[in-house]
Image (cartoon, grey):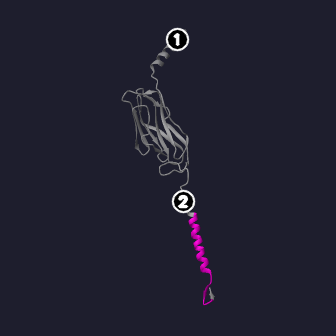
Amino acid sequence: MKKLFLGIVTIMLVLAIMVPTVNAAKLSQDKTEMKVGEIVTVTLTTDDEVEYLQFDLKFDNTKFEYMKDSAKSTLSATGSNLTSDNVVTVSAFDLKEGTTKELSLQFKAISTGEHVPFNVEGTIEIGKNGEVIENPDIEVLKIEEGPYLDENGNPITELPKTGIIIMIPAICAIVAIIAVFVVKASKPKKVNNRRYK
């Protein structure tokens, strides 16, 4: 009985060693709730250092705008390109055989919404060992109305100066001049020592 048990354990150990392990990459975001105008960073993190990455990330282009050239990693050639209105193709590699464990992209919230998804789709290549993405779908739970923004996308922190303080004395002066003319015009006129209205 002992020999049978040891034999089964030995076979299981040999099989466990022979089966290649598949590492899993994870997709995450730095915010789950945000305001219009704010930026969310979407990051793909791998278990092991990898030599290259390539994947397509689909997003809701009615809620987010891709921040052009925001793809970042420690690999020397990291780039991204909008391949359609709502898909960013990301690729990264290193000419000097460098490695990375992380690649990030940024998106700016442009309108309100709830449960706004990001999805990895299409061909996925992650390193020589072929890591898979454990969670290819993530979401921002809530995008709320944010601060009012100027034409450059910066929050407006004060109302524009209209010059109303300068206009108040000018308006008072005009009203006083009109009042003088009205009072003069309402006095009866004397013609040949007689008063006429």
Image location of residue 55, percent across then percent down:
42, 36
Left or right for 133, reference 175 = left
Would you name the residue on which mark 1 appears? Answer: 6
Residue in the picture at 45% in, 19% down: 18
Specify which label sits upstream in the sequence, 1 or 2. 1
Residue 91 % position (x, y): 40, 35
Residue 94 horizontal side relative to residue 161, left or right: left
Residue at 49 percent across and 16 percent down: it is 13
Residue 104: % across, % down: 46, 36
Residue 10 shown in magenta? no
Percent of width and height locating residue 97:
38, 27
Task: Give the position of the C terminus as an image quadrant.
Answer: bottom right
Helix, strand or loop at disc 2? loop
Tell me the element at label 1: helix
The image quarter containing residue 20 is top left
**Which residue is under mark 2?**
163
- Residue 188 part of the magenta-drawn span: yes
The label shown at residue 80 is: none
Residue lying at the far bottom of the rendered structure: 192
Give the amino acid type for the residue marked by disc 2 in the picture: Gly
The magenta-colored residue range is: 168-193
